[in-house]
Amino acid sequence: MSERNSGLYEKALTPLMKAASVLNIESDIVSVLSSPERALIVSIPVKMDRGKMRVFTGYRVQHNTSRGPTKGGIRYHPGVCIDEVKSLAFWMSIKNGVVGVPYGGGKGGITCNPKEMSQGELERLTRGYAAAIAKFVGPDQDIPAPDVGTNAQIMGWFADEYYKITGKHLPGVITAKPLSIGGSRGRGTATGRGAFFATLEAVKTFNMSLRGARVSIQGYGNVAQPIANYLYELGCKIVAVSDSVGGAYNPEGMNPTALAELKTKTRSVKGFPGSREISTGDPITVDCDILIPAALENQITEKNVNDVKAKLIVEEANGPTTPEADKILHEKGVKIIPDVLANAGGVTVSYFEWVQNRIGYYWSDEEVDEKLKGVMIKAFKDVYQTAQQHEIDMRTAAYVTSVKKIIEAMQALGRL
């Protein structure tokens, strides 16, 4: 297990323990919520382009089914391990409860480096993974989607393999598919768009201004690029960005579209014209007003938290802040839109896609955007109201909001 993921699941449960204390939840119920219902580990043999066979390890974790089928992405990354996938599935249960979509949390992943694999190898890997977990997924069971290292094309391959195995055309088995095979409009930018709506509410609630606000972003992929564009259009300065290769810093601001074009061309924002080169982790500590961690877990830690200068943190990544750092940020008065709220736009529009797949009727861009905006604004207000009511931080409030819904569903089903 990588250092980044060491003890990750125990850390992921920390806000649950705080929420349980606020809600006076008994320890046996906390134990139930802390334990995923199912965790699969599968072996996926793949014939590589040079003719050699290689066996990859894949995972799928289904955390809780009391509120509906489980839902969550598939991650392709060298650091994927069971602890990480369990954490991500747990966060999905909380996230789905926060925004009120009728799902439990699920997550999957394969330990691999997709950047070192050809399209053919990725397709064979994806089809092998789909075949290995086909019995355990479906529109009424568990609905995957993309995550780090995966995309719409990979969802298409997964869907096709599932159709072949089951003999049924069920597009609701997976979301964030290409539009041509049942994907939803607005899904590609949904996570960034949802975070943008949450940011607008936070700025209004906390009496901040976006005009001239300096924004620093760690991670510059499909999740971060949309919110960078939206904030730039409202007058923010994008002063720092980074990816897995390196980063760029310019206190006068950079054009997010030009940054995205450079990344498409060279696979990195490193070397952006007029910028100073920085490391992958530097955006966390540069002088800025809004910090958007949009990469991986455990990026804001005890080691760098005292160097964080942002007034508002919008967590587009899952679990970017360790519990120890979270406590220090709260004491410093830094405002945080926690991951289970900030990045819930993706699963919200995935829910919209699933609904459209099931009814066979598809919405316009405007309809999707309006519905997403309504969900995100309501979720932010609900969490903020809970924080004020119990005099707790926004992260704990998000967990309180969600855990109440999960427990109510489990009690209604007779599972508690």
Image (cartoon, rainbow, N blue to C red):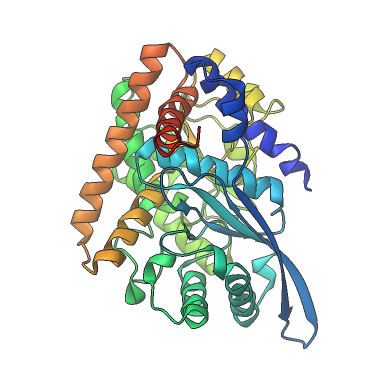
Looking at the image, residue 308 lies above or below residue 119: above
Q: Nearer the viewer, residue 370 or 223?
A: 370
Q: Nearer the viewer, residue 183 or 246?
A: 183
The x, y position of residue 228, in whole percent, is: 40, 47
Residue 31 shows in the view? yes
* Rendering quarter of residue 48: bottom right
Looking at the image, residue 83 lies above or below residue 20: below
Q: Nearer the viewer, residue 73 or 152?
A: 73
The x, y position of residue 198, in whole percent, is: 34, 36
* Rendering quarter of residue 59: bottom right
**163 sits to left or right of 331:** left
Looking at the image, residue 53 lies above or below residue 290: below
Residue 315 shows in the view? no
**53 sits to left or right of 381:** right
Which residue does the image show at 49% across and 83% down from the upper left? Answer: 164
Which residue does the image show at 51% across and 73% down from the upper left? Answer: 158
* Rendering quarter of residue 119: bottom right
Which residue does the image show at 63% across and 50% down from the upper left? Answer: 85
Q: Nearer the viewer, residue 138 or 147?
A: 138
Which residue of the protein is positioned furthest toward the bottom in this rendering?
51
The x, y position of residue 157, in whole percent, is: 51, 76
Which residue does the image show at 52% across and 71% down from the upper left? Answer: 154
Instruction: Give the number of callouts.
Output: 0
The x, y position of residue 280, in whole percent, is: 64, 46
